[in-house]
Structures are given as C-alpha cells and as structure tokens.
C-alpha cells in the first residue's frame, strides 16, 4: 500500500505531508478521550463524515476521565519548536474551552491557576520565560506571597505565578460537549484494520466488521501503535494515580487550582480535593492490575506537597478517601505523535543510507499507509495539547493550511523515531 507524494515539497522528504483525502470522506476515529473528541470535531468542521468508536460505554472512559484536571501553560526549556508548540497549544485550548463554556460547564470553580513549579529552579525559569514575553500580556504574572494568599484564599507561604486564563476543568464534560453531535459506537473494541479497496474495514476481536471507512484516525492511546498496518510507533504506557482528600474547614477556603510538580484542586462537588498525580512506567498494560489503587501512590501525592509547599500540607491535612488510576501514553522524547502512519519497509528502503549525510534532495518523498493517521502520546497534558494537535491532524488529512509551522509538524511526526534510527545506522 504505497502512497508517495513527491509533488508536495517539504524541506525533509521523510516528513513530507501526506496526500489529502476527498471532502466528505468517511473517517472513523478510534478513541473517545480528548484526543479522539478533538480530532472528530476538527474533521467535522472541515466537512468530513465522522464516526467515533470506543471500547468504553461513553466518552472519557480512560485517561481523560478524571473528575477534574488543570490546564496551564508550560515553558519551552530552550527548544524553540517545543516552546512554540506548548504555548500555541495552551492559548488555543483556552479559546476552545471558553467557546464550549457558553453552553457547557467545562470550567470548575474560580477561574485561574497558581503555579509554584516543581522546584525553585523551575519556577525561576518559568518566571524568566514570562518576563521575556513567553505569553501575551495578561496571561501570566508573578505573584508575591501576599498576592498568592489573596488569590488562593489560604496562606500557602510561597510566591508563585498567576495564570488568570488557566484553571480547573471538567475533562468528561469537555469530551461530552465535543462529541455531542457526532455519531458514536461505544462498547466496541477495535482489534484490526483491514484494507478494503481504497478504504478500510475496522474489525472487532471476533473479526466482525464494525464499519467500512475511507480513513481511520488512531486516537486510542498506546493501543494506536498496535493497529498501524505497516509500521509501529514506540509508544509507552505511564500509570497515573490521583488521590481524593476530604476537605477540612481550612482547605474549603482554597479558591483556585495549584500546580507544584503535583497539583491540588479546590473542593469539588464530592467534598474532596483532587491531588495528583503519580507518573510510573507501566509495561504490563494488557492486565488490569494498573487499576488497583495503592497507599504508596497516595503517599507519593502527599509527599509532593510536603516537598514543595509545606504550608499547604498543613491546610490539606485530612485523610485520603479514594482515588483513580489511569494509563497515559508517552514517547521516549516526551512529545506527541501526530500525522500519517508510515510504511516501515519503504522507509528503510528509501532512507537506508541517511547516516551518510547525503544531500536531502536526492531522496524520494515519504511513503505512507493511505488513510491511516495517529494522534497519541499526549502524556499528562492532553487537554492542553489536543485541540491544536487535532487541528494540525485535520489539516494534514484534508490538505488544508497547517495551524503550525514546519518545525512543529516535523517535531511530532510518527516517523521521527524510525528516521532517527536510520540516521544512526
């Protein structure tokens, strides 16, 4: 299944854009978490006929299903393309969720977020990033201890950064809102993609065909790589456990979400704060053992507070009354995977001598699996990244102008790991 597209110029042939599919084509999106919900919405807006498939009984049944989450900006750490991706994605996500909030309850509690960084060095770097214009005016300011006390409603005993447009979100409400008018097939586990003419059959475990479609978007976490027909992407599962802490009289005064390496939310409707989250490599994702809550992980969430904000720990000093665990998807370079699935055999044939440093223009354009795309590996920042990356993917699929520049397009390419391997030889 070869799809060479040499006519669409790109600086690096192995990252060249894929051939667009026709307007009105049927696209199956696998996964009803934030990646799938944003992908479906972006494709609908571009005139595609979309159906979403998920193994759970409704949207946000996996990593996107926490009772609350925080959305906040993130500095780039010196990598310009990475910084541009993070900042552009955050600003875009805020606009999307503000638009949704006109008709759905997507923000929880008082708007805004206080950040203290995972350590003093991180906070200093983040502060300098803001001072250098990392965000538009009004999106972030330094806050003294007194400012923090006034904003938070409790004395945290530390200075930090105040992001008034960030805040605490309702993840499931966002996914439901994005998917409210999109056809869905819930309770269906996709086991295989099978080529059928110019399109695909999406198959269940028993071989039954769920749907015939022109294209498929794999937005189902680490399982996405297992469904790629012609080349796998090295995706990893990371287990995250959050803790529910019963509120105290003092902690009920906390008004906004706090980020400090871990995070804490204000009191939610269940009378508890959410503390999070652990982040552990989890190789055995085929079993359900990852769902089991552990006291060790609850203690880790508490230790995050002790280490960074001891004053806060005195306020949040009640018992843990529950929690939730989920598997998030990451990559070795901590970047998302967004774009067309690639043909590994063709890549190895066409680019086998990349290690020799020959001129780029002698190589043919990338060979892709026609009609198969990925949006995965959003890690713990899915709700900040997904809206922009879904727009990028929809532009890739339809042939429209990209919402990001070429450097970001290449940065998140699913083929980048294989290209690096070929360059090393």
Image (cartoon, rainbow, N blue to C red):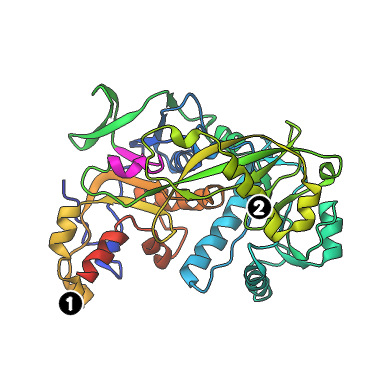
**Quarter occupied by residue 129:** bottom right
Left or right: 56 as drawn, with respect to 123: left
Left or right: 30 as drawn, with respect to 62: left
Residue shown at 83%/65% (left/top)? Answer: 145
Q: Position of residue 239 (x, y in %)?
A: 48, 44
Nearest to viewer (mark 1 / mark 2): 2
Q: Position of residue 26 (x, y in %)?
A: 34, 34
Please say whether residue 399 is visible from this viewpoint: no
> Looking at the picture, does residue 213 appear above or below residue 83?
above
Image marks 1 and 2: residues in contact by CB distance under 8 Å: no
Left or right: 197 as drawn, with respect to 276: left
Is the C terminus in the top left, top right, bottom left or bottom right quadrant? Answer: bottom left
* Most distant residue in the front direction: 296
Closer to us: 254 or 111: 254
Residue 356's mark?
A: 1
Numbered disc 2: secondary structure: helix
Residue shown at 66%/66% (left/top)? Answer: 136
Distance between the Cα atoms at labels 1 and 2? 49 Å
Closer to us: 304 or 194: 304
Q: Position of residue 49 (x, y in %)?
A: 39, 34
**For marks 1 and 2 on the same chain, the one whose residue lies earlier in the sequence:** 2
Residue placed under numbered mark 2 in the picture: 303
Numbered disc 1: secondary structure: helix
Please say whether residue 111 is visible from this viewpoint: yes
Q: Position of residue 10 (x, y in %)?
A: 30, 67
Q: Bounds of the magenta span?
A: 215-226
Residue shown at 17%/34% (left/top)? Answer: 197
Closer to us: 124 or 295: 295
Say few, some or many: other residues with alpha carbon within 10 Å of mark 2 (under 14 / 14 to 19 / 20 or more). some
> Looking at the picture, does residue 362 appear above or below residue 5?
below
Left or right: 246 as drawn, with respect to 59: right
In reply to whether residue 362 is colored magenta, the answer given is no
């Amino acid at each position: 299944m070869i799809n060479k597209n040499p006519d669409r110029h790109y600086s690096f042939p192995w990252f060249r854009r894929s051939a667009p599919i026709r307007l009105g084509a049927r696209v199956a999106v696998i996964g009803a978490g934030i990646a799938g919900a944003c992908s479906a919405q972006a494709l609908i807006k571009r005139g595609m006929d979309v159906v979403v498939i998920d193994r759970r009984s409704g949207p946000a049944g996996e990593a996107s299903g926490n009772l609350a989450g925080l959305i906040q900006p993130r500095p780039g750490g010196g990598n310009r393309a990475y910084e541009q991706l993070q900042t552009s994605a955050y600003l875009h996500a805020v606009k999307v969720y503000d638009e949704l909030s006109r008709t759905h309850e997507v923000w929880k509690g008082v708007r805004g977020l206080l950040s203290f960084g995972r350590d003093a060095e991180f906070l200093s770097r983040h502060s300098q990033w803001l001072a250098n214009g990392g965000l538009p005016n009004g999106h972030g300011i330094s806050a003294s201890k007194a400012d923090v006390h006034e904003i938070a409603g409790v004395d945290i005993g530390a200075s930090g950064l105040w992001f008034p447009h960030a805040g605490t979100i309702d993840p499931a409400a966002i996914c439901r809102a994005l998917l409210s008018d999109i056809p869905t097939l819930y309770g269906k586990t996709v086991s295989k993609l099978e080529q059928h003419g110019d399109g695909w059959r999406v198959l269940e475990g028993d071989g039954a065909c769920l749907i015939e479609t022109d294209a498929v978007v794999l937005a189902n976490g680490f399982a996405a790589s297992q469904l790629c027909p012609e080349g796998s992407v090295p995706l990893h599962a990371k287990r995250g456990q959050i803790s529910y802490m019963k509120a105290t009289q003092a902690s009920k005064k906390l008004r906004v979400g706090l980020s400090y390496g871990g995070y804490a939310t204000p009191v939610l409707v269940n009378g508890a704060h959410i503390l999070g989250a652990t982040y552990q490599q989890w190789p055995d994702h085929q079993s359900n053992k990852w769902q089991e809550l552990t006291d060790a992980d609850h203690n880790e969430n508490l230790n995050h507070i002790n280490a960074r904000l001891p004053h806060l720990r005195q306020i949040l000093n009640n018992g843990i009354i529950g929690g939730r665990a989920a598997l998030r998807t990451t990559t070795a370079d901590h970047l998302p995977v967004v774009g067309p699935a690639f043909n590994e055999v063709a890549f190895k044939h066409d680019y086998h001598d990349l290690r020799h440093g020959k001129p780029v223009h002698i190589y043919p354009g990338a060979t892709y699996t026609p009609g198969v795309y990925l949006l995965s590996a959003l890690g713990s920042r899915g709700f900040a990244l997904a809206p922009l990356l879904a727009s990028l993917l929809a532009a890739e699929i339809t042939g429209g102008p990209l919402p990001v520049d070429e450097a970001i397009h290449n940065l998140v390419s699913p083929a980048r790991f294989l290209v690096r391997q070929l360059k090393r030889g």
